[in-house]
Image (cartoon, rainbow, N blue to C red):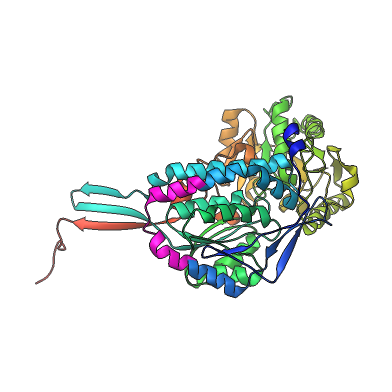
Amino acid sequence: MEERLEDLKVSKEPIIVHAIIDGKKVETENKLPRENPTHPDEIVGYAPINTKEEAIRAIDAAYNAFKSWAWSDVEDRIARMKRAIQKIKDATPEIAELLSREHGKALYDAEGEIAVSLMWMEFACDHVKNVVTPQEKKHENGRTIITFDPIGVVSAITPWNYPISLSTIKIAPALLTGNTMVLKPSPFAPLAVSRVAEIIADEFPPGVLNLVHGEADVGIELTSNEKVAKIAFTGGTKTAKSIMKAASETIKKMTLELGGNDAAIVLEDFDVNDERALRRMVISNFLTAGQICMIAKRVYVHRSIYKEFVEKYIEAANKWIRVGDPFNPDVTVGPVNNKNQVKYVQSLIEDAKSKGAEVIKLGKIISPDLMENGYFLQPTLVLGADYHDPIVAEEQFGPTVPILPFDDEEQVIALHNESIYGLTSSVWGEVEHAIKVARRIEAGTTMINTAAIQGLDVRFPFGGVKQSGVGREYGEEGLKSYTETHVINIPKNLDLPYIPE
């Protein structure tokens, strides 16, 4: 890693990415600068500010392309996607560098995001035929054919925290199952994902994958235009509510992966001397500076081991957390992505302190010279917060975590399940005991003795319950969510059992 990083030359020349509509790059007069969260005075690049009219053009291009793409051969789709996968692999060093600069995540983290994206794209290529191959059933009443057809134009709107993986999680299944797409990334991380989208779009016919950037008017068009058949959105619950209202006029299909306030439950039979488990816990709290929808954002520990757990947790955190320049190979936690997020996380910490909670700084500052000017927050542990304080009840989406004691399983299950969210969760302890508790947790995914990306498996469905989302991504279920089931019945007896003369 160190040798490769020494050879890596970080370009200071801002790059410019473009919209892609009907296979052509679109120049725009207005452009949005994207700053480097590590060095906010550095502009990493510019993304276009597209207009509502350009969004309509992109939707129209996808709508027209769908007419032929829907009937394309699945083997051709797979071959095209595999060529794109190889090109992304070849370009990974360049894309990871760009992602790290515009986002702030450590370089190893950026490379990991690309690796997960490719893993999913390859899974989708390997399994799409299982999903779209028609089924034919012969039975006593005749014959039935079931087909799994593409839906139409998909609008994909993606966030800044994992811009590449949360875009490819939508692009791959949509295109492989015969849909077309218009993708709109977040303005807080628009550059690297645009490079990936451009690579993929180049392998497919014009109009199959379109890319636009822009402000609210573009997003509104993508969620309300009558030619859009499905919306695939990852982001905040508040925004999702607006999307659902806009989509209701034309009853669009939706896959929504939304916010979460994921809890980790540490049972009394958890081994507090298991250093690797404690390291996994720390990583599940602070990877990507805590800016992951499925990260463990509140930790409940059985009171019988609470004091010792906190001591061991602090030891593990101080070993793993090293804050600084994302390109330093010793750094594990980079800056927060943007100024507004810094202010929000700080406000939660200050609120907890004002109510008597203890706030403990964690880890080591590797680059003290960057801390003042960059969007850095030193990771913190919060002790003594109330179960319903904002820092516990709300999604922090930053490098802070509260640890709270509980007395019995009924109490902690109730504390977990009272949340309006239910994306992921984790239970830590003796495996069979942990599974028994996990069965009572209201969440889309519960992990045992690990959490967050460490426990993610792209072979199986992922998504939330309650206000954490609608539908599932990943796995064959994620592929199938981009298809419509069409039943063709051929009965033996074409008459009703009794028809009056």
State the quadrant of the C terminus. bottom left
Residue reaching furthest left?
Answer: 501
Front position in the image: 125 or 234 = 125
Tally of marks? 0
Quarter holding the N terminus is top right
78 part of magenta stretch = yes
Q: Residue at x 79, y 39 (%)?
A: 328
Residue 68 relative to residue 106: left or right: left
- Which residue is at a point 86% across and 43% down the rendered structure image? 358
Horizontal and vertical percent position of residue 368: 90, 43
Q: What is the quadrant of residue 266 in the picture? A: top right
Magenta segment includes 390 = no
Nearer to the camera, 153 or 482: 153
- Taking depth in this image into account, of 373 and 340 the one nearest to the observer is 373
The magenta segment is 62-83
Using the rendered image of the protein, determine whether residue 279 is visible from the camera's viewpoint.
yes
Q: Main secondary structure of the magenta part?
A: helix
Instruction: Residue at the far bottom: name it.
Output: 53
Q: Position of residue 237 (x, y in %)?
A: 63, 60
Decide: is 385 above or below 158.
Answer: above
Determine whether 461 is above or below 272 in the image: below
Is residue 348 shown above or below 476? below
* Residue 243 at x, y percent in the picture: 58, 66
- Is residue 224 something one can see in this rendering? no
On the image, the x and y values in percent for residue 458 come to: 53, 42
Determine whether, in the image, residue 433 is placed left or right of residue 147. right
Which residue is located at x 46 percent, y 59 percent?
Answer: 205
The answer to which image quadrant residue 112 occupies is: top right
